[in-house]
Image (cartoon, helix red, strand yellow):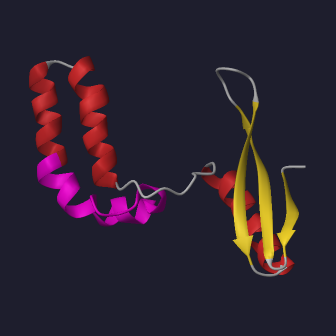
Amino acid sequence: MRGHLTKRGENSWTIVVDVGRDPATGKRRQQWVSVKGTKRDAEKRLAEILTELDKSGYVKPTKLTVGDFLERWLTDYVRPNVAPLTAEGYEHIVRKHLTPTLGNIPLAQLAPDHLQHY
């Protein structure tokens, strides 16, 4: 089974979803999500998570924005791995074009519509 519910309290449920295996270690990975409300609310949220997992893979919600992610990408990947002139070009594109328009969107909520509109 890919997901199940566990009752935690009066109106509290835990959803446990199997999100596949870690490619490096081969160990099983699970995502735990807490839900306040009725069992029906928890079942509905479980169905949403499983649908999300089927479509594009489940992304654990975080407060990381697109702008923060792009800055981290520039620092951690671009500067050490590409030529200096290429890195300058990427930085220009990120800072002048991408961050002002897409930078405040939470990364977990970034959708194809945002990119299409941009």
Using the image as rendered, state which of residue 40 and residue 9 is in the foreground. Answer: 9
Question: Residue 1 at what x, y percent from top left?
Answer: 90, 49
Using the image as rendered, state which of residue 113 and residue 95 is in the foreground. Answer: 95
Using the image as rendered, state which of residue 55 and residue 64 is in the foreground. Answer: 64
Q: Please tell me whether residue 29 is drawn above or below residue 56 in the rendered image.
A: above
Magenta stretch, residue numbers: 95-118
Quadrant of the rendered image containing residue 92: top left
Point out the residue furthest to the right here.
1
Magenta region includes residue 100: yes
Q: Is residue 23 left or right of residue 11?
A: left
Question: Residue 69 at what x, y percent from top left?
Answer: 34, 46
Residue at (57% x, 51% y) in the render: 59
The quadrant the C terminus occupies is bottom left
Residue at (69% x, 20% y) in the render: 25
Q: Is residue 95 left or right of residue 41?
A: left
Question: Residue 36 at what x, y percent from top left?
Answer: 72, 76
Q: Please tell me whether residue 39 is drawn above or below residue 99 in the rendered image.
A: below
Point out the residue furthest to the front here.
9
Question: Residue 15 at what x, y percent from top left?
Answer: 78, 60
Residue at (76% x, 27% y) in the render: 27
